[in-house]
Amino acid sequence: MTHAVPSLTQTYAQRFAPHLAAAEGFLNQLLPSQDPKVLWDAMRHGVLSGGKRIRAVMVLETCLACGGTQQQALGAAAALELIHCYSLIHDDLPCIDNDDLRRGKPTVHKAFGEDMAVLAGDALLAMAFFVLTDHTQDVPDKTLLNVVSHLSRSASVFGLVNGQVDDIQYANHPPSEALLKQIHQGKTGALFRFATWSGATLAGQPAPVADALSQFGQLLGVAFQIVDDLLDVNAEAATLGKTPGKDATQGKMTYPAVYGIEGSQKQLQQTLESLDAILNRLPADIDRDGLRFLVQFVKEREF
Ligand code: IPE
Ligand code: IPE
Ligand code: MG
Ligand code: MG
Ligand code: MG
């Protein structure tokens, strides 16, 4: 069944309007409808169908908060969204989570077939790297090279893919707090970590500041995935834009599976407090307002 595309909450859309407009505009420009049309249209469907763009917003917001510019961060922001969207296309495949609905629309394999879904994902992953190198402005080559290396690691067996493997392997496994953390840090934390680390690094911040923001991003990713797990239990498809209840059906090791609903909310609260503590320790010249807003958004999001 197809549902209406969920709209962003007013406040998030308003607070980050310039970031959202820049990211959306740039992604549109990168993905024209051209030959081979079936592939490009599958890529467009996987990217331009109404994501929240939180990872792009994190790169842009962190870079600006650290004294950088939109030009320095937009290439990395778009590259990260391309990788995120590829990961969703593959995550939804019948051989992984087997989902029919994403962002209120049929998943890419439902609309274009499994062959094109696999290839659209491959194409988006590869594309991310030339988008990053060709569209980053006003950043020294050495810094950009470091960012490329980190993006590759974050998407790799040292990050996202490893988390996805754990997510699959530990389905129907006895509950384990340590394994749960490992899954969430990999499958969601790794890209979130790159988002804030790259924003700080592209702005020219020294390693200790980038590392603190990296820790912030990683933990925000865990919070984001705790909420995702809770929404899978509590939300309706019409609001969520995805089919709820899938995690339990597939025996996934989620926060509710390990801690229960109330326990998960407690874990979330503790994570939010740790996030606040990291922000409080940042140097005084870094503007934390937008980052605080992001924490609030992660806590309150409904899809
Ligand atoms: C979904 O990510 C996958 C998770 C890591 C939970 P998002 O909730 O950021 O997906 P979109 O891009 O906004 O649709
Ligand atoms: C997704 O986790 C993490 C990815 C790397 C794609 P989920 O499988 O929980 O994400 P949804 O619920 O399908 O969006
Ligand atoms: Mg999954
Ligand atoms: Mg999934
Ligand atoms: Mg989920």
Image (cartoon, helix red, strand yellow):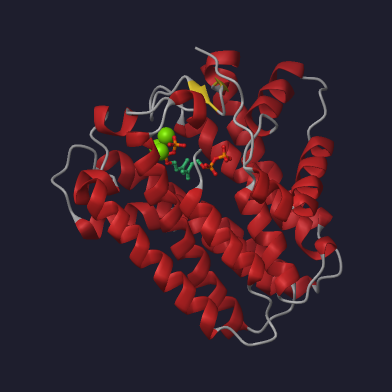
Instruction: Please indicate, yes or no, whether residue 241 appears anywhere in the rendered image.
Output: no
Q: Residue furthest bottom?
A: 284
Judging depth in this view, the residue of 113 and 107 nearest the camera is 107
Judging depth in this view, the residue of 206 and 300 nearest the camera is 300
Left or right side of 228 for 136 = right
Q: Residue furthest top?
A: 1
Q: Taking 35 as reference, is 65 above or below it?
A: below
Instruction: Please indicate, yes or no, whether residue 64 appears anywhere in the rendered image.
Output: yes
Q: Residue at x 42, y 27 (%)?
A: 236
Q: Residue at x 28, y 49 (%)?
A: 255
Judging depth in this view, the residue of 143 and 185 nearest the camera is 185
**Which quadrant would residue 293 be assigned to in this image?**
bottom right
Left or right side of 44 for 46 = left
Instruction: From the top left corner, tell me how far across and down residue 208 is, in percent.
Output: 57, 85
Q: Taking 243 as reference, is 204 above or below it?
A: below
Instruction: From the top left corner, tell me how far across and down residue 130 is, in percent.
Output: 75, 49
Q: Residue furthest front?
A: 10
Instruction: From the top left corner, tell me how far across and down residue 121 is, in percent.
Output: 59, 33
Judging depth in this view, the residue of 182 and 132 nearest the camera is 182
**Which quadrant would residue 151 be assigned to in this image?**
bottom right
Instruction: From the top left corner, tell me how far across and down residue 228 is, in percent.
Output: 42, 43
* Number of numbered tags placed on the structure image: 0
Q: Residue at x 80, y 38 (%)?
A: 30
Which of the four quarters of the rendered structure image does ligand 2 lie in? top left
